[in-house]
Image: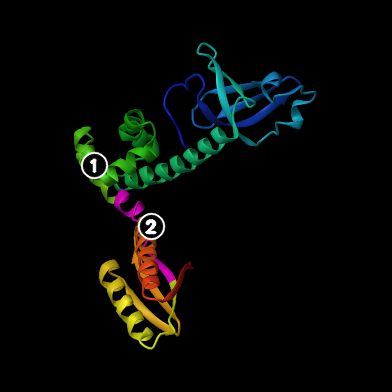
Amino acid sequence: MVRRKGMPTLRESVICTAKKITPFAAWCTLDEYSNLEGMIHISEVAGKWVYDIREFVKQGKQYVAKVVRIDTEKNVVNLSLKRVSSREEKEKLNLYRKEQRAEKILEQAGKGLKKTLDQAYDEVGYMLQEKFGDMYSAFEEIKKKPEILEELDVPKNWSSALKEIIEIAFKEKEVILRADVELKSYASDGVEKIKSSLSNFEKKSKVKVKYISAPKYRIEIKTNDPKNVEKKLREELEKLMKNTKTLGIEGSYKFVK
């Protein structure tokens, strides 16, 4: 279970699970904070008059709630459902899923060092949360700049274990981008013009063009960065369309799965 140290802050979005429901409140566990209880008063359930809290809160169900008050003496946190926007809910759930993944990475690194998950959090996990806000963001930065671990004085055994696991966990998958191109020309030298245009396109874009059947051609490229590569390829294809048009060639393209 994802965990965080200490207490949440006011207006923080948290993950909670309803455990007990009374006529006027729902009592919850704060899933990221151990030994903390949360309370959602009936007035904080929805932005309208609520006659029966059970219509909105179900026992055993997980919710995204906002912290509206903290009682440090009683270790109770007052929560609100109605103050959480749909955007905030989506962002929190996405972050929680990422943090679950980060916890698995931390746990794997710990196993290699014969450390329990509790020890992993105490020795490095909580420190990374404090420095970066959450472990997932920390691991993303470590992937880009592994020397961060030395800068933070992370013990060498943990530094080596984390680098190894993060390198595997954040390895980008190679995908194949495909685009079909159609080029038509009714001129006597149209075929030669098309061949010349495609040859120049291959040199500039550094991709291979395969002949399918007149007038279709297929472009395929393997990449670990599909978003940026597709953008660049689209720009090159637009240039190809403009150039072929000036040569009296009818052209079109589309990306295919």
Quarter assignment of residue 191: bottom left
Confirm whether the magenta stretch covers residue 55: no
Q: Is residue 164 left or right of residue 8?
A: left
The percent coordinates of residue 167 (x first, y second) are: 29, 52
Label 1 CA crowd tier, 10 Å (few <14, some 14–19, many 20+): many
Q: Which residue is mark 2?
A: 231
For marks 2 and 1, give the one nearer the viewer: 2
In-front residue for pair 43/236: 236
Label 2: few (<14), some (14–19) or many (≥20) C-alpha neighbours in 10 Å: few
* Residue wearing tag 1: 159
- Report whether residue 247 is seen: yes
Tell me what residue is drawn at x 71 percent, y 26 percent. Answer: 21
Give the residue type at disc 2.
Lys
Can residue 181 be spotted in the picture?
no
Q: Kindly state the secondary structure of the residue where label 2 is placed.
A: helix
The amino acid type, in three-letter code, at marker 1 is Ser
Residue under the point 38% across and 66% down: 242
In the image shown, does 105 or 151 lie closer to the viewer? Answer: 151
> Label 2 to label 1, Cα distance in Å?
36 Å
For image coordinates 43% across by 29% down, the residue present is: 4
Q: Residue at x 77, y 23 (%)?
A: 50
- Name the image colouring: rainbow
User: Which residues, given as a range, are shown in magenta?
Assistant: 165-179
Q: From the top left corner, tell me how far across and down residue 145 is, in percent.
A: 24, 43
Q: Earlier in the sequence, mark 2 or mark 1?
A: 1
Circles 2 and 1: CB atoms closer than 8 Å = no
Q: Quadrant of residue 87?
A: top right
